[in-house]
Image (tube, rainbow, N blue to C red):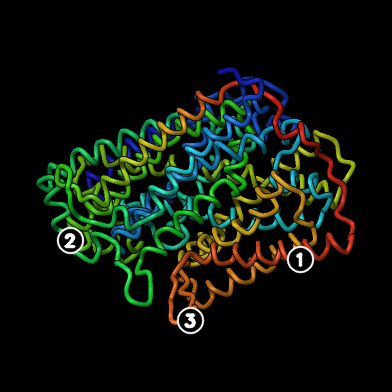
Amino acid sequence: MTSSNPRPRAWLWHLLLLAPFVGTLWVPFYNAIDPRLAGIPYFYWYQLTWIGISAVVTAVVYFATRWPD
Amino acid sequence: MSHEHYAALTVFVGLFGLVTALGFVAARWRRADLDQLHEWGLAGRRFGTVVTWFLLGGDLYTAYTFMAVPALVFGAGAIGFFAVPYTIIAYPFVFVVMPRLWSVSHRRGYITGADFVRGRFGSGTLALAVAITGLLATMPYIALQLVGIQVVLGAMGVEGSGWMSDLPLVIAFAILAAYTYQSGLRAPALIAIVKDAVIYVTVIAAVLVVPIRLGGYAKIFDAVPPQKLILTPPGPHDFGQYSAFSSLALGSALALFLYPHSLTGVLSSSGRAVIRRNSALLPAYSFLLALIALLGTMAIAAGVDKDPAFSHGFARYGTNFAVPALFLRTFSPSFAGFAFASIAIGALVPAAIMSIAAANLFTRNIYREYLRPDCDGKEEATVAKIASLVVKVGALAFVVLAPQKYAIQLQLLGGVWILQTFPAVVVGLYTRRLHRWALLVGWATGMTVGTTMAYQLHFKGTVYPLHVGPWTISAYAALWALLANLGVAVVLSAILNRAGVDPGIDATDAPDYAGGP
């Protein structure tokens, strides 16, 4: 598949950046004590995990949209 | 002062001396003509990915953040963890929005957010509103960095009486003022590298050592009262702490990069790619902040406030003493000195960048705009250097003369205020459909609504319970104010645009927003 205009696809990649907003701002996803991880309640390790996920997501979007714009 | 205090103080003074030397040496780093504002105030817009990472990390994660976030967790529990989603979502936002601002600023020579608003909407008045908001939000923030230094000095037993009690603070700030004056943004950029290194060492040591002393993470969380461990769930007519938590995170994230010192950091980078790469790399600091928030949880478990040795500190500095007390309890005297130095150096970097950002705002958007429109580059840079001194002296006087709580309350208000520049600065990057006068009225509405809400909360907090029918929705006042601001701006724009009121001249064009490296 060839695309003469990469911009529409760049936009689709940027939609991935909404994931951290949904994952962290919707509190009912994670306001719980169990399951614990190494003694740490879910509320805490869930948020720690999202720091990593959002960094990876941002890196993916960066590499996918790296052409000169 | 005891022997332990001297050991801590020796390490502290040694590290402080090191960064002072760096601050002055910085003037020779990437040598250029420091008599030009874009060289003194933005370091020539040449910082690459690595330096920008250190600079922004040192700039955004301030000493006060490192003290106030665990203090909030210590005092209020889980709600204090809003700082984690806050710093998570800030970066996807930066990734999309800030390259546009960098491009147009690079192309048109803008140094502040107000510069951009001036060019985009052709309105000096709207730019002045943005500049004054930036100054109002920044000044108490600088003062709070001083409060951070005060607390760690107090923890090391440096507490004279009368005017002597403030002498160490005055000396520290005089040194900071001198090398900022001489080296400009290069000084905090170089010092940020040391700051970030010592902070990482301190925090990693703390999250490894404290749990060993307290018997592991499971024991730490078991010691936290249930009502502090997670958020209050929604009741029949409210959202519990859920809406407060999310709105604090969202509002703070949107506000973060409207602060003048954040924009200074962004604009000093060498290009769009540097900003985008940093959006993926800066979460390393968010991880650090999450660990620091956990220190608040650990301080609850350690019961530091019940230790008579710390009762004086808590009486004097409130919950801000929680982390210093935890360090004193856990670390050897010399490592405690290292840890306190990390907080104090952590205060110097943002204080320097904030004063530079405030100086840039004053020089560009007040002095050159209204007082001396035809001043040359050298005069501009000289005025900025002097303004950076005035700003610091003002912050110092405020901390020494006024009760500490005023600085804290003003900083809370500053967060509410700065978000009211969102429509002009961020929405303005994408569209000119919002009319300049509608933006100005919207800004005034947001400032009024936000300040009124804070007043009704007696300036003690910023979570405002809004009553809608049978419902009570508690949310960050900055966000309520922004909704009012945007509502007014949109409706009034429709009216003004239809009536054909002059929308002003746009000095920028579409390619400006996408160009550059």
> To which chain does the residue with label 2 belong?
B
Is B245 situated left or right of B364 in this image?
A: left
Q: How many marks?
A: 3
Residue farthest left in this picture: B215
Crowd rating for badge 2 (residues with CA inside 10 Å; few <14, some 14–19, many 20+)? few
Q: Which of marks 2 and 1 is nearer the N terminus?
A: 2
Q: Quadrant of the C terminus of chain B?
A: top right
Q: Which of marks 3 and 2 is nearer the N terminus?
A: 2
Is A50 situated left or right of A65 in this image?
A: left
Q: Residue B90: percent from the left, percent from the top?
A: 49, 44
User: For residue B395, which quarter of the picture?
Assistant: bottom right
Residue occupying image coordinates x 43% and y 39%? B345
Mark 2 → mark 1, Cα distance in angstroms? 58 Å
Secondary structure type for disc 2:
loop
- Residue under label 3, please give it: B469
Mark 2 or mark 1, whichever is nearer to me: 1
> Is mark 3 in CB contact (under 8 Å) with mark 2?
no
Any part of residue B443 in sight = yes
> Is mark 2 in CB contact (under 8 Å) with mark 1?
no
Residue occupying image coordinates x 81% and y 66%? B495
Secondary structure type for disc 3:
loop
Report the disc number at residue B307. Answer: 2
Mark 1 → mark 3, Cα distance in angstroms? 27 Å
Secondary structure type for disc 1:
helix
Q: In this view, does B201 lie above or below B67?
A: above
Q: Residue B429: percent from the left, percent from the top?
A: 70, 44
> To which chain does the residue with label 3 belong?
B
- Residue under label 1, please give it: B492
Any part of residue B348 in sight = no
Residue occupying image coordinates x 80% and y 33%? B378
Residue in the foreground of this view, choosing between B402 and B290: B290
> To which chain does the residue with label 1 belong?
B
